[in-house]
Image (cartoon, rainbow, N blue to C red):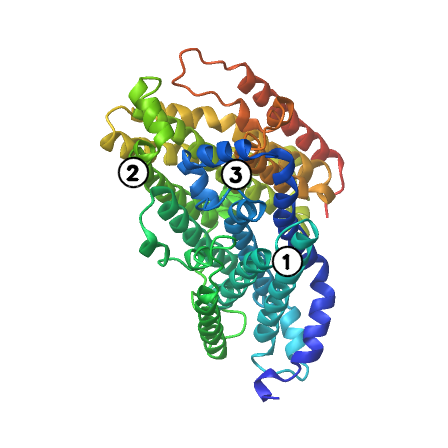
Amino acid sequence: MNQTLTGAKPLLRAALKQDARNIAPWIMLISALSASSVLAYAWVFPDLHARQQLSATLGANPALSLIFGPSRDLLTADGFNAWRAGALGTFFAALMTIFIVIRNSRADEDSGQAELLASGVMGRQTRLAVAMMMAVLASIALGVVSWLLTIACGGGWQNSLMLSATFTASGLMFAGVAGIAAQIGSDARTANSIAVATLGIAFIVRGYIDASQAGEWAVWLTPLGWLEQVRPAAGNNGRPLLLALAFTIVTAAIALALHAHRDFGLGMIAPRRGPARAGMVASVWGLALRINRGSLISWLIAFAGLGMVFGFLATSVGDVFASNPAMGGLIRSGATTQAGLIFAFLVTILQLVGIIASVFGVQIVMRVYAEELDYRVEPVLAGSLSRTRYLASNAIIAFVAPAVALLIAGTVIGLVASAAEPGIAAGDVLRQAAATIPAMWAIVAVSLAAVGANPRVRLAGWLAVVATFAITLLGPMFRLWDWILGISPLWHVPNVTAAAVDWSGLGWVSLVAALLTVVGFVGFGRRDVI
């Protein structure tokens, strides 16, 4: 074996054994996404009429194309599965391998574990190579498990194979991206941010192209668009997978080349020196702001960019509505207007922006426990600082920062959309964004209650985000009962341009958010701090 990879086999065995419990849930959940689509299809859409109705509904909603991609064949279970699980499955597969590579390469340097390993008989490239090998094995395992599970639930073997292959290809491609990010970032957190931001941009570009119906050529501008061209259950074209494989090889080679010339423990982006004087970190409020400053700046810029993208998308969906026979008929009959359809589209877009903003808030809350695990909280609380004040300094940022981000996105969307569509008022879009804030706070409050009262169930914060996403965007399609749809806080957000706006549901959501916040503060005051 090449000396640069000395020790790879034993390290790979040990790392897989240690990280298997982190990888397995990703594989099972993504596989379940595919298998459940096949199972649910026959139950929810039992006859041809229901399936034709589904196809017409999805064709009239560009917001769903933004998230799930184009719906090519909704008259079969495999075609529905390819639409519902395709784009989301590739996104989550990429997210899985990003976390695997960063966690087993750059994060080990930050914790000091890598230095301990390097003191033994190990090649310079071994750790990064092993991290990417783990991502490769996880991607292959995901493809195999997803394929077998989907077939077991009634999916066609060839269609399911092509869909599962896109999951594997996505994981492989972004394992290479994560390897490069691990060399660029000054620490594991920065590397994760770079890789996830790259994935997010690729996903948004792909969604914009699909929702605006920009044309087949435009799909090739993003790696996730390549996988879309595989067309599972609607052509089964395997050639784009070769392009994904070539992308993986190139990015992995670049990552290994950068790693060979990078100083241990440092990234190509050098960390900034700290201030000579304490400045804004002289108080607990300044400390909380300083800890989250990097993510605050990044997220706020990202939301301004999202506002631009979604604003321009809103200006193009008018033509999409007009070209749709059902929507065009409604407009011509006077039942609605093009501006009304566009605003309904913007309501859905702002719900999606609200979910993204909740991810921002949950991330800030999770940072509280991360600081605790790094033994930085107990020394801060050893003085006269109360637990309530410490948690409040972080909780305020977790609530205010996502709200500001949501308003920034709403403002930009409104300005861009109103400039192109006279029937859309920028003020109405901003008011709709403001109405979404309490629902977003309720999701963040779930995370705050979990971290504050019992960090062992902190996963509830992320589960709340996922559940809200699934119920809000997929619940109406699956004809779920109102009491289930009402679990999502966003279901209670009214359309502010309606003739009679009902704010009562949002009032109850705000009350729930307040109660969960109280649970978090009371629990944090009583539990042990690491």
Between 468 and 185, which is closer to the camera in this rendering? 468
Disc number lying in front (3 or 2): 2
Q: Is residue 451 above or below residue 10?
A: above
Residue marked by disc 1: 147
How far apart are the alpha carbons under marks 3 and 2? Answer: 43 Å
Q: Position of residue 266 (x, y in %)?
A: 50, 69
Disc nearer the start of the sequence (1/3): 1
Residue marked by disc 3: 285
Disc number lying in front (2 or 1): 1
Residue 433 placement: quadrant: top left
Q: Amino acid at mark 2?
A: Ser
SS category of the residue bearing label 3: helix
Q: Could you classify mark 2 by the number of other residues whose Cα lies within 10 Å: few (under 14), some (14-19), or many (20 or more)?
A: some
Report the residue that reaches farthest toward the top.
500
Between 361 and 416, which is closer to the camera in this rendering? 416
Q: Position of residue 303 (x, y in %)?
A: 40, 41
Disc number lying in front (1 or 3): 1
SS category of the residue bearing label 2: helix
Residue marked by disc 2: 316
Q: Position of residue 119 (x, y in %)?
A: 66, 80
Quarter of the image with the N terminus is bottom right
